Image: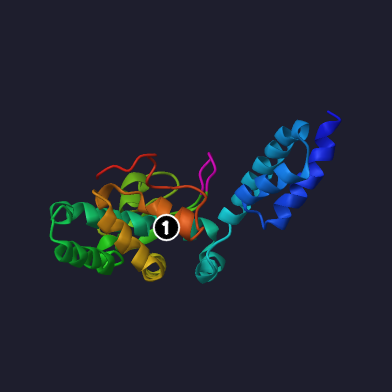
Amino acid sequence: KLCRPLCIAPCLKAFSLTQRRLPEALVGCHRMISLPCRLSCLLAVVWTSARVSADWRNQPHPSFVSYVEELGADLACNACALSMQSMRTLFASKRKGMKSKDSEKKRALVHEVLDASCGKSQFADELIINEPGKNGGGRRYQDWVEYMKRFGLSSEVKGYTEGEKCGDACVKHRENVRRLCSSVIQELATVFAEQALATKTPGGFNWEKLACVNRLGLCNSTLLHQTDEDEEL
């Protein structure tokens, strides 16, 4: 108990001096304090590192800060997730071609997928913004037709007839998703291409985690690709 307060201060100093790089911080702790205190130092560094990593993960990529400000963090995350779902679906449709041993053919298919991922046909014609329910969570985009078919006769949404259009606002929501999608593809095109060519089943790869969580910081966790393991659609 007496040792821990004496350990944590030099340990965190070492952590800050190494600019928050965990391995170097541990080496610094090892050199700065005696053996009985090293376990306390290790726990302090790992705990602080986890907290810092969480803070960094919540920070969006500089190129996408404007989307977060415009749409809100929840919808920017959802738009990214929808974009990666679109790309994953397209890769799944090219399953046979992506198994080809012809590298040039595979590369052409990858670029074809990237070019088509943000097309109109990949998203619902009209999207609404579904507010968080009783269980909480952020807002999400949802297909207007699917929503109205499910809730059109409810007390909350009345008077829906099949084929009825939502209007310009819902088309704008779709275009906002497509706009963010295009930015994601543009920002990470090289990363996507390299990963697709190195992956046996790109249609099962967790693109959402790679792009929205790890690379762009738009999401803290995946929304649509829920499994821990990559799996083919």
Most common SS among magenta residues: loop
The residue positioned 35% from the left and 67% from the top of the image is 190
Tell me if 59 is positioned left or right of 163 in this view.
right
In this view of the protein, which residue sits in the foreground, 149 or 76?
Answer: 76
Mark 1: amino acid: Ala
The vertical placement of 191 against 46, above or below, is below
Instruction: Identify the element where label 1 is drawn.
Output: helix
Judging by the rendered image, the residue that carries numbered circle 1 is 211
* Label 1 Cα neighbours within 10 Å, binned few <14 / some 14-19 / many ≥20: many
In the image, 79: left or right of 26? left
How does the figure colour the protein chain or chains? rainbow
- Nearest the eye: 10 or 86: 10
Residue at (84% x, 37% y) in the render = 5
Residue positioned 77% across, 31% down in the render = 36
Q: Which residues are magenta?
A: 132-137
Residue 63: x and y, percent? 50, 71
Residue toward you, 45 or 26:
26
Residue 158 spot, x, y in % from top left: 39, 51
Residue 140, image x, y percentages: 45, 53
Residue 144 figure quarter: bottom left
Q: Residue at x 33, y 54 (%)?
A: 85
Q: Nearer the viewer, residue 66 or 141?
A: 66
Residue 205 lies within the magenta run: no
- In the rendered image, the quadrant that contains the C terminus is top left
Q: Quadrant of the N terminus?
A: top right
Q: Give the number of marks.
A: 1
- In percent of width and height, residue 228 lies at 39, 39
* Residue 169 showing in the rendered view: no
